[in-house]
């Protein structure tokens, strides 16, 4: 079993970004600036946004946080987004999801200027991604591709199973890995909540990308020897031995599969840290495009 | 074996569209108007465009053909497209593909006003399609869905194989059939030129959608009993018994599979006629949206 150390790779990427920022500064070029829009007081959302801002500091980016009350109207939120669109100092921004009930997420995301849409969720960027046109790739799939590339895992002609069809992970990674690109050319199957032969699909796959959020769902008897597993799930389970009373686990029962897998991403420390690194990489790209 | 009669279904749809146009006319509403942009003198492209215009006449649409020399520059072509975008009498238009060498197809398609993009190839419409947001669906996948729906073939939890990953057929149909929609929820695998286990995939599938353009590729020994086959391929093969010297066949060896398949679309007369019907349906929708 080889562990794909997402933490280590993400630090490499952050260091590369920091070097690029240093070079920009010494050439009197603009310092990249990432902004985050946070609506309401959802705990995990605040944590994610804080991590993104902290990562900006680490690489020398400027950052801004636009916080709004849960009670903000959709019209007012759109006005605020349009202000950020017009703010030439901001190179990219994200709208932290989920948005509160009563605000149409689809409508809000379509109002982000595509040239600043570093999450890649605007339909025009999502469409370019699906069409294989250069654009901002959503951060989690981009992070998975970066891990696969840096570990030199060749997906060409491999049987790849993506479990989950979400807009932010399952759908885009399934499209990207089946495209005729250097990191792609896999034969991809997308499984989801209506799939009835999941065990059969797992055991026949060379690569499994799991993004369903069911803790420790994938067991050793569901996989074939040598499989590569990318575990995107993040769940909390009770753990009396921990001082916190819980521990973080993925979709894969790590101990149970360890004797059979080839490559595997751990949780935590696998795909998670890559997501923020790729978001910053998109922001750097956006900033460079305006040079 | 039940033959899915695409010709018959397409006539039903054209009749439905004609009825809608008649109602519009009697209510003094605008008559839908489809335009086609044709560049160069590619024979098959001219034939396709003529069929589209003929179908417009059949349902009572207005139609226009904008023909340009093969030598037109990309800039001039964009200017012409922008004129059509601004023409309030035209509800929808298509740019007939392929475009001549030297013209960037991606760039041209991105210049079509998304609200008139009845082919659904503009990145913003393609992105909406991939995100499951209501939009103009590309005509061939829309036709396949219409056939499946009208034949009441339930794809939920079925193993569906899409052969081919083109932007106009394989990619969009693979996305659509795996979405959580009334016609979807299939477990979809996309096979392509780098897939090495195609025979194994075929024999395990409940539904095969083939869009590779290899004449009579799928044989009886590659499929399981009762499979549904949607054949998108259109190829010419030599046929001395025909006065033309050739005949039109699909990706499937029709005679060879006939004793094993459940449902099958013939070629010609299957998916082909549906494509134009769905294009006109998109044009009617576009026209209705401006009422």
Image (cartoon, coloured by chain):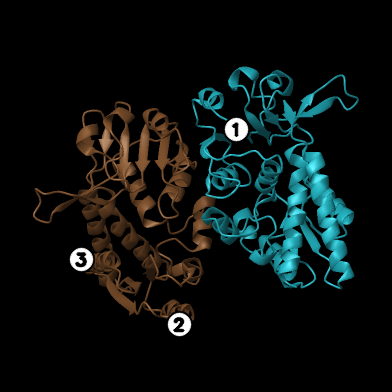
Chain colours: A brown, B cyan
Which residue corresponds to mark 2? A76
Which residue corresponds to mark 3? A58
Where residue A219 appears, as percent x and y from the top left, is 28, 33
Q: Quadrant of the C terminus of chain A?
A: bottom left
Where residue A78 appears, as percent x and y from the top left, is 47, 78
Sequence-wise, which precedes: disc 3 or disc 2?
A: 3
**SS class, disc 2:** helix
Along the line of sight, the residue nearer the viewer: B74 or B169: B169
Q: CA distance from mark 2 to mark 1?
A: 47 Å
At x 36%, y 41%, the residue is: A209
Q: Chain of mark 3?
A: A
Q: Is A90 on the left or on the right of B189, as rendered?
A: left
Q: Is residue B200 above or below residue B283?
A: above
Q: Circles 1 and 3: CB distance less than 8 Å? A: no
Q: Circles 3 and 2: CB distance less than 8 Å? A: no
At x 68%, y 65%, the residue is: B78
Where residue B49 appears, as percent x and y from the top left, is 80, 50
Q: CA distance from mark 3 to mark 2?
A: 32 Å
Q: Chain of mark 1?
A: B
Along the line of sight, the residue nearer the viewer: B193 or B170: B170
Which residue corresponds to mark 1? B207
Q: Is residue A219 above or below residue A15?
A: above
**SS class, disc 3:** helix
Circles 2 and 1 on the same chain = no
Q: CA distance from mark 1 to mark 3?
A: 51 Å
- Residue B188 seen from this side: yes
At x 48%, y 46%, the residue is: A175
Q: Chain of mark 2?
A: A
Q: Which mark is residue B177?
A: none
Q: Is residue B159 above or below residue B86?
A: above
């Amino acid at each position: 079993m080889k562990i794909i150390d997402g933490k280590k790779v993400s630090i490499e990427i952050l260091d590369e970004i920091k070097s690029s920022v240093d070079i920009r500064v010494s050439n009197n070029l603009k310092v990249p600036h990432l902004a985050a829009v946070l609506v309401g007081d959802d705990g995990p959302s605040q944590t994610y946004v804080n991590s993104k801002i902290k990562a900006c500091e680490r690489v020398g980016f400027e950052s801004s946080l636009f916080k709004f009350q849960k009670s903000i109207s959709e019209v007012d939120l759109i006005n605020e987004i349009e202000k950020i669109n017009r703010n030439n100092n901001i190179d990219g921004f994200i709208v932290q999801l989920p948005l509160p009930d009563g605000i149409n997420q689809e409508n809000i995301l379509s109002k982000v200027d595509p040239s600043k849409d570093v999450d890649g969720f605007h339909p025009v960027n999502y469409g370019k991604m699906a069409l294989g046109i250069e654009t901002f790739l959503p951060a989690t799939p981009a992070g998975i591709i970066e891990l696969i590339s840096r570990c030199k895992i060749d997906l060409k002609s491999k049987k790849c199973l993506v479990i989950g069809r979400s807009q932010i992970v399952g759908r885009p990674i399934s499209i990207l890995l089946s495209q005729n690109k250097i990191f792609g050319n896999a034969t991809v199957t997308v499984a989801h909540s209506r799939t009835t032969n999941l065990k059969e699909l797992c055991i026949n796959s060379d690569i499994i990308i799991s993004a369903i959020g069911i803790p420790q769902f994938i067991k050793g008897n569901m996989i074939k020897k040598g499989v590569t597993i990318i575990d995107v799930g993040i769940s909390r389970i009770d753990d009396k031995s921990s001082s916190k009373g819980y521990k973080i686990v993925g979709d894969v029962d790590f101990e149970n599969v360890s004797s059979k897998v080839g490559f595997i991403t751990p949780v935590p420390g696998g795909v998670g840290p890559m997501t923020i690194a790729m978001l910053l990489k998109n922001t750097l790209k956006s900033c460079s495009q305006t040079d």
